[in-house]
Image: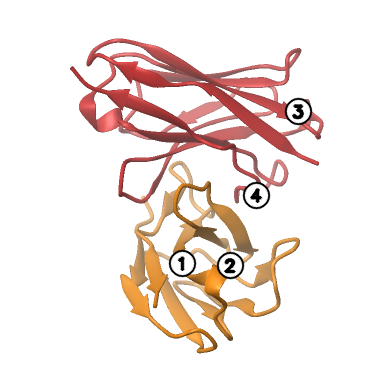
Chain colours: A red, B orange
Amino acid sequence: QVHLVQSGGGVVLPGRSLRVSCAASGFTFTDFGMHWVRQAPGKGLEWVAMISYDGKNKYYADSVKGRFTISRDNSENTLYLQMNGLRDEDTAVYYCTKPPGRTFNWFDPWGQGTLVTVSS
Amino acid sequence: EIVMTQSPATLSVSPGERATLSCRASQNINNYLAWYQQTPGQAPRLLIFGASTRATGIPARFSGSGSGTEFTLTISSLQSEDFALYYCQQYNYWPPFTFGPGTKVDI
């Protein structure tokens, strides 16, 4: 059974940095790209970033490009999102999620979510 | 960027009734569309992929249809646990992967 267990998050001052993690189990981590999706309080879902199965290709939403970095440690089956230069509008629940394979990108399952609050 | 729209924003129905939710893409996305359900405080759950294929464990009362730019999620007979938010997502043209704004199904 696939499990995505997230950690990190918390309250951070504007302009500061934070890293969230996602520990994967129940599948061959190195076979799959991975994604981060976020949800601001009371708002809809926003795709944030994607990393290929081997970590060589990374894609970002324009809203986070240049500030956020997605990465993975395939030896530890762990996905990361390093968030720098955080802004008030980055306040959201961040979810890691997995596509079904290398060709299509719907998302299933999702991690439990981790709340990042940017506030002074 | 593909813009996804959903209607209505809120759908008020009674248990046992049929619910029809719409999703529209700003360009042809073929059938590269997924539907998700989200209940308060929970992560989204995949319902439908490929516009019409139910995900594992999803009850048969959920069905998806459409292709191109117009899509529909139908819940044939609403159960109490179906009152939730529903999002559509396109995965044909990326990045970015884009979601609709959601439809809230409530009583």
* Mark number displayed over residue B28: 1
Amino acid identity at mark 1: Asn
Q: Chain of mark 2?
A: B
In front here: B82 or B73? B82
Q: Which residue is labeled 3 in the image?
A: A29
Label 2 neighbour load within 10 Å: few <14, some 14-19, many 20+: many
* Mark number displayed over residue B31: 2
**Judging from the image, what secondary structure is the residue with disc 3 in?**
helix
Q: Which residue is labeled 4 in the image?
A: A104
Residue A67 is drawn in which quadrant?
Answer: top left
Q: Chain of mark 1?
A: B
Amino acid identity at mark 4: Phe
Amino acid identity at mark 3: Phe
Whole-number angstrom distance, CA of label 3 to CA of label 4: 16 Å
Residue A23, above or below A75: below
Q: Chain of mark 3?
A: A
In front here: A111 or B48? A111
Label 3 neighbour load within 10 Å: few <14, some 14-19, many 20+: many
Whole-number angstrom distance, CA of label 3 to CA of label 1: 32 Å
Residue A1, above or below B33: above
N-terminal of the pair, mark 3 or mark 4, is 3
Nearest-to-viewer mark from 3 and 2:
3
Amino acid identity at mark 2: Asn
Residue placed at 38% from the left, 67% from the top?
B103
Whether residue B11 sits left or right of residue A33 in the image: it is left
Label 4 neighbour load within 10 Å: few <14, some 14-19, many 20+: few
Nearest-to-viewer mark from 3 and 4:
3
Residue B20, above or below A25: below
Whether residue B98 sits left or right of residue A103 in the image: it is left
Residue placed at 71% from the left, 47% from the top?
A100
**Judging from the image, what secondary structure is the residue with disc 2 in?**
loop
Whether residue A100 sits left or right of residue A117 in the image: it is right
